[in-house]
Amino acid sequence: YPWECLKDPKADVPLTVSEARPFCRLYGSARPAPLEALPLRFLFAICNPRDLETDPGQAADAARLAVARLPKLEVAQELEIIHLAMRDLVADGLASYRVLERSSTGPVTREALAGAMKADGGYHVLHLLAHGGRKERREDYALVMENPAGDHDFVYPAELHSTMFEHGLRLIVLAACDSATPVSATALKSLALHLIDKGVPAVIAMQGEMPIKAAQVFTQRFYDDLASTGRVDMALAATRHDLYDLHLEGAAWAIPQLVMSRHDGLLFQVDALRASTRRRPKAEDLKVRDYEELGAVDPAPRRTAQAVEGLLRDHGYGGEALSNAVRAVLAPHLARRAPEPEPLAAGQRREDLLHLAPMVALNGIKLQAYVEQKHQLELPPAAYAQIASALNAGKHVILIGAPGTGKTSLAQAVCDYAADPQQHAQPFTPGYVLTTATADWTTFDTVGGYVPTQEGALQFRPGIFLEAVSAGRWLIIDEINRAEIDKAFGELFTLLSGQGVHLPYKVRGEAVRVLPPARPGEGEAQPARAWIPRGLGSAYHYVMHPSWRILGTMNVYDKSTLFQMSFAFMRRFAFVDVDPPGDPRFFYLVDKWLHDRGVPASLAAVAKTPAAWGDCKPIQQHFRRLLHLRPVEGADLTGENPLMVLRKMGPAIVKDMIEYIADRHQVEQQEARLHDIMGEAFLLYVVPQLDGLDYQGIHDVYSCVEAIFTGAVDMQAPILERLRVLYPHVRDLGKKAQGA
């Protein structure tokens, strides 16, 4: 907002917030028109089409898609703002007003608006609340109003007939986004200027979206000052000053843009005597209300209270008598709350799950091909067959393996395969939910529980498990043994064993239940619905689809150090080992990764076979010494490798090491430094994995590393020294071995 943000360099405040320096855009010449006398007549129109914020997938064309993306207006909030702003003006005889809003007066069409403008002798001020913008694939600006059916209607400037503005209208306030922008890409004229051409003396348009709290202050202060002075420019300057002082949403004070044709800004002749007896509100008097907290309060009794106050005042009541009368009559109603808001728990939409296959039927060979092609994972073929058969048999699966073997990636790949419509005539799941278990988990996190609302009530919120069951999405629980199983899963033990569970919660008076799928003959008659138990009415009875599964992952080295799993829990799962690939495949992967990352390595990787020992570069030979599981021909590697036996390194860890080596090598470009850099990578990625080994295990790994890096003194020394620092006992064990 460049012009509104101009500052006085001495005062360091925008020029536009000074009441002594009103700021506007003059357009055209002053139009000699008779000035109206008070009271002012206001017409408020709220355009809130029914098809705002609908499902974009149901949009039939680009126009409906653009409308579906627009949020609905909070009509109750807008009405509350209007009534609050007009209350004192009406009570003091300075204004009267009418509100057009679909639920009470019918759709707010352009014809309905034109008819209202002519009724009751016309209106002085039109305040139009609507969405505005450019229709998709069309560059012209349009207001989003309503058609006779209550759905959207794009109204362009040329369709706003001048006859609407021939009944004493002096000011239009366009509470519509970007109503101050040009109406088209080829014309500089905005909608505000277009309306000035139609004969309206002044228009206030918006250069952006006015935040709700700023809109409250604007409506309260601006109309109060306008009715007191008749000067639109002075009233807006005072309003900007208050917005600036209250620090509401940054530059909200700069959003309203005033365009007028009267050079003096005087729109109305006011009753100076009546206006002088009123105390104009100051910034601290303005009521800025938090409508997120106000959401549960029914505004109707408040409007009733205002009407009763006016009626009693007309009959001579005032002061304490008026206050006591209103309290006596309306106290029970003012305490009343609106109906319960939408619950935090959405009911299960079982219709959305009818397209899923009734049972899981995965093919292990096709699963392997899919995972290797789509996700580039290298795992033993037996793992795919075991996973497929376990899931087909109705079991949930936990993948066990060393760090870096790709357990989580494999679980995601399995879920992707189960959900891929190109792989199955009927998918088994619409997708998956990934979560990581923690020691703090309780049934509140997994199943759900009551949470307090802003109104002080309690509402049920489903946990991650219930949300996945409701949507039919498979659930991946990473690091599942990090949770205290009995505390975290609670009632789920019963459900996973095939029995229904009554949860101790209610939504709108209905008990929340989680049910297994119906057995043959117990479900509904239609084949697609056979898994749904008969007579199930409540949406808060969540039914587990027969193809729904849990996939968990568990670091095998954490199994003894974290929470133990009970046998009752383990019985409900199949445990599949995910081991690193065997030596030849692992060596090929190392060769390939080194070659792909530009680290000097044999080109044998192109042939998808590991290079012979004699053809390997030194960096490859060191990796093979680290990773070998069994003796390697020609490599002088005998017996088992204690490092890979006690702390297997998965492909992900090795790939991380190679990424590190490649980055360092790219910077230094010295092959002689590769030994040192590999030693650094070993210290960064492998040594931390040794934590938790017993004394003898550490000694075995120490001796193994010492033998592997024999001859590479620069690389060996820092590694061995680091191990001695972390595990001082290796010195003692080494001395005892020599003494023996």
Image (cartoon, rainbow, N blue to C red):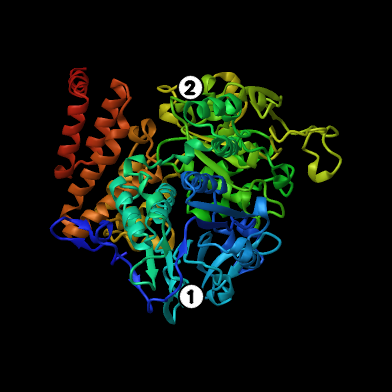
Front residue of 687/414: it is 414
Residue 687 placement, left or right of 277 = left
Quick check: can you spot residue 65?
A: no
Query: What residue is rendered at 72% in x and 42% in y?
Result: 350
Specify the quadrant that holds the N terminus: bottom left
Q: Is residue 264 above or below residue 281?
A: below
Front residue of 466/405: it is 466
Q: Secondary structure at mark 1?
A: loop
Can you tell which of label 2 and label 1 is closer to the viewer?
1
Few, some or many residues within 10 Å of mark 2 (<14, 14–19, 20+): some
Residue 289 placement, left or right of 57 = left
Query: What residue is rendered at 69% in x and 26% in y?
Result: 509
Front residue of 276/118: it is 276
Front residue of 423/301: it is 301
Few, some or many residues within 10 Å of mark 1 (<14, 14–19, 20+): some
Kindly indicate the quadrant of the structure image that contains residue 278.
top left
The residue singled out by tag 1 in the image is: 199
Specify the quadrant that holds the C terminus: top left
In the image, which disc is placed on residue 603? none
Percent coordinates x, y for residue 120 in the rendering = 62, 60
Residue 688 placement, left or right of 414 = left
Q: Amino acid at mark 2?
A: Glu
Q: Secondary structure at mark 2?
A: loop
Percent coordinates x, y for residue 621 in the rendering = 29, 49
Q: Is residue 423 above or below residue 382?
A: below
The residue singled out by tag 2 in the image is: 484
